[in-house]
Image (cartoon, rainbow, N blue to C red):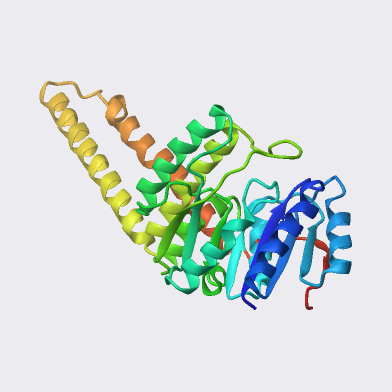
Amino acid sequence: MDISVVIPLYNEEESIPELYQWIARVMDEHHYSYEIIFINDGSTDQSWKVIRELSKDHEEVKGIRFRRNYGKSPALYCGFKEALGDVVITMDADLQDSPDEIPALYQMVTVEGYDLVSGYKQKRYDPISKTIPTKLFNATARKISGIKNLHDFNCGLKAYRQEVVKNIEVYGEMHRYIPYLAKNAGFDRIGEKVVQHQARKYGSSKFMGLNRFVNGYLDLLTLWFLSTFGKKPMHVFGFLGTIMFFIGFIAAIIIGVDKLWALSHGIAHRLVTDSPYFYISLAMMIIGTQFFLAGFIGDLISRSSSGRNDYQIAETVHLED
């Protein structure tokens, strides 16, 4: 199979038929063999009914329905797991991503040799309250990830070599950083293509505002930390341990000198605990170490959890058991 199109969606019943017709037209014009995998992320409208109706008449339409809303990353994870195409295309279901971009994306992967190609919506039709935070976020992501040539990490329109999606694990809210995940997995041939961005035709945006970007930065820091120290914990533990020990050692010397000075001046009643350095060093060593290590170990446990990607799927269509 040439192409798998993976489409996560939430409450997009009006867009789905038009999106399918658009994709099918492009695929037929270029004689691609393809499948379209819709992942219904707990929609409360008639999205799943529309998908089922399409699947009855078109065998290339496949679907996964979550029992509840999990988020875009879980939807992509399940879609990637089922994808059979040599090239996997992801796009949003709101008609803001143009299927007319698919042939060029496919060529960049199959002919030009890219592992991953990310769309860049250079001209956007979003409100300024969304575009400005997006620019700031992408600038930070480029700096931390080291992928300097990407302007839009969060663009839903991307193309992947199948090997990429089968060797990365998307969970939580990590869909924003798939290029970074791919780079960490050894797929460093990452390209970008300017793509057309269209105004939303139906419904309202699922954009979550400030909370989304706060979570995005936290996820980015988590990913950077785990990719840097996840397999080398002693590098960070040893560094912190050395710093903590050095501070404690200096504090101990100061406290000891102070105690000797007090004794030499006949102030025998002065105790070690009278020094504020004692409490400062103790607080830094205990509270700082506990909080930092608790967060780090907790994230390692989360990454190793066998049930992290255990999503309750209620129904599927045209998917092999």
Is 275 placed left or right of 121 in the picture?
A: left
Q: Residue furthest front?
A: 29
Q: Residue furthest left?
A: 264
> Can residue 168 be seen at all in this image of the molecule?
no
Is 256 placed left or right of 134 in the picture?
A: left
Is 89 placed left or right of 47 in the picture?
A: left
Is 302 placed left or right of 252 in the picture?
A: right
Between 306 and 77, the one nearer to me in the picture: 77
Residue 69, horizontal then vertical, whole percent: 75, 49
Residue 303, horizontal then vertical, whole percent: 55, 60
**Which quadrant of the figure has residue 96?**
top right
**Which quadrant of the figure has residue 63?**
bottom right
Say how many tags the image has. Answer: 0
Q: Residue at x 38, y 60 (%)?
A: 233
Residue 207, horizontal then vertical, whole percent: 64, 37
Residue 36, horizontal then vertical, whole percent: 72, 65
